[in-house]
Amino acid sequence: MPTVTSPLYEAERRLERLLGMGAPAARRAVVEVLDCFREDVDEFIVARHRELQQAGMTNEQAFQQLSAELPTLRFVAPNLTLRQLRRRIYG
């Protein structure tokens, strides 16, 4: 009977082989990537806005940047106006 391994285990082993990571580091890397994929659009908008502000951007610059980034992300994000972006951040 063939051995069945999980895709996560395979991902960890691949990171070990390709990048020379130890098993704990490879496991942590897989967990971190999966966490990124759990984030929804609103969580991304709030977190990214905070990052952009910490990088010194004004709100207007941050909203423009967010508006440009959303269509390129892994989830299907609606086309949001700058006003809609503000409302998702500030309520």
Image: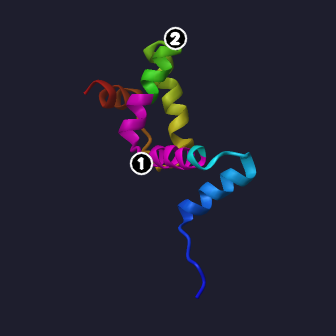
Residue 20: image location, x then y, percent: 73, 46
Left or right: 90, with 17 as reference point: left
Left or right: 22, with 7 as reference point: right
Instruction: Name the residue located 73 percent from the left edge and 54 percent from the top edge.
Output: 17
The front one of 32 and 76 is 32
Q: Which residue carries the number 2 mark?
A: 56
Q: Which residue carries the number 1 mark?
A: 38
| Amino acid type at image mark 2 | Gly
- Label 1 residue SS: helix
Residue 67: image location, x then y, percent: 49, 32
Relative to 88, does residue 60 appear above or below in the rendering? above
Res 83 → quadrant:
top left
Q: Give the magenta part as a residue range.
A: 26-47
Instruction: Name the residue located 45 percent from the left edge and 45 percent from the top edge.
Output: 35
The front one of 63 and 5 is 5
| Amino acid type at image mark 1 | Arg
